[in-house]
Amino acid sequence: MSFTGRKKELSFLEESFNRDGSFLSVLYGRKGVGKTALCKKFAQGRVSCFLFARECSDVRQRRYFAEDLSMEENESGLWSYSDIFEYAFRKNSSDGKLLLVIDEFQHIIKDSSSFMDELTSFLGKHDCMAILISSSISYVENSFVSKTGRNALSVDRFLKVGELGFLDCVKYFDGRTTEECIEIYSILGGVPAYWECFDKTLPPAENIKKNILSKNSFLFTEGREMVASELRELTVYGTVLSCMAAGECKLNDIHLQTGYSRAKISVYLKTLIEMELVEKVYPFDAADNTAARKGLYRIKVPFLRFYYRVICGHYSDLSLLSVSDFYKKIASGLIIDICMKGLKEVCKEYLSIMGDNGALPIKPVRSGEWQGKNGNIDVILEDDAGRIVIAFVSVKEETDLKEYTSFLKTAGSSGLKPVRMYIFSAGHFSDDLKVMEKEDDSIKLVRIEEL
């Protein structure tokens, strides 16, 4: 995997490595976001040892590690983790501080009662920085401490690696238009492993047909594997996700569509939220929420949303039609709605960067959105003084005064009194709206080409 972005994460690792003595960090995030690539980048020019855990028994795990390090057979044919760590250190210690990286470490802990004891003991004796990597967010955040007990206290830092931002996507797909990058980002999200599946020389439509919708492509089954890799009852989870992908975002609506009890659905939604595959949308705290839609759920991961909306939701059509016909007759229309959701995230990132650079009338410390019964506010930013900036996203060919009046009405329903309103448009703005912007500093118009 090629390396993109991650300046803050590299800075943290650099600072940690330069400390005196040993340092233990747990680095975790969803599969494909670039955790291992980050560690490989950081390891360049350093004495390092990488061990990749498998899903196997503890005895077999230790044998794999010994083979990876080319350790000589001992009399018993068994090595302890202490033996393995000591061997790695002796092999490299003359060249400076050792960077020890253990990938997917949760596979070890699930079957070993001694791994963390032996690792912490080793670190107490040697000049070494150890990084434990995991692709299971739920395990690290909900099970690691209870599983490892007092040894969890030896972890100096938990570093969560999220998806890359839209600007990283633009840099990666250099030469593509803003609109094309938004389409790619709306479908693949900020996962560099998915980006690498796309051919940079092909437009998004051809990439989608070739590298997602074709049944021999890696991404064709990736949406299912994202869920199946950690969950057993795929039928139930798949049903709930399919409903949300189709627009059923309230608990009662999912109940009516599935026939599952509300209590059962709540349990499964809780698990999906812990895995960060689904999120619950809450009304913005500072708003008047009498006109808000409450208790809304939605799929958080862009590619998972695409998979259940396009592939799983229309699998019969995809099986009967050619890929080109399926894209033309079905997928292309669905992608427009998917891109609308992606565009909102891009606009939110744009405003966040502006806030960091002091280009907004406020210094944002909180962000959110407002889902109204008769309209939504796509982005809300608030500073410590309670001052608000809001943003709306329009996908109409022309955004005019009528559309602007509708936005004002929605803002009024929320009870928010923004110091500035941003309107992002996928099309163009009417002349009278442009004149209004010049006369009123509280209104800012942004076309997506400027993002």
Image: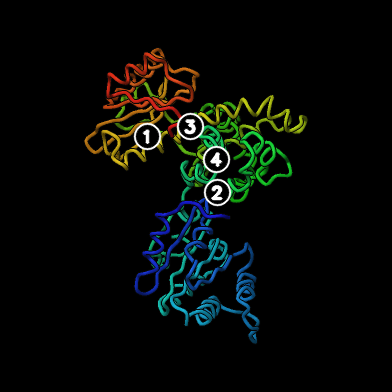
Q: Nearer the viewer, mark 1 or mark 2?
A: 2
User: Are circles 2 and 4 on residues that touch, CB within 8 Å?
Assistant: no
The crowd level at tag 3 (other Cα within 10 Å; few <14, some 14-19, many 20+) is many
Residue annotated with mark 2 = 192
SS for dot 4: loop
Among the two numbered marks 2 and 3 on one chain, the one whose residue lies closer to the N terminus: 2
The crowd level at tag 4 (other Cα within 10 Å; few <14, some 14-19, many 20+) is few
Q: Amino acid at mark 2?
A: Pro
Residue annotated with mark 1 = 368
Q: Amino acid at mark 4?
A: Gly
SS for dot 3: helix
* Residue 339 screen position, x and y as percent: 53, 31
From the viewer's side, name the closer residue of 315 and 303.
303
Which of the image's four quarters has the N terminus?
Answer: bottom right
* Residue 282 screen position, x and y as percent: 39, 33
User: Are circles 1 and 2 on residues that touch, CB within 8 Å?
Assistant: no
The quarter of the displayed image where residue 111 is located: bottom right
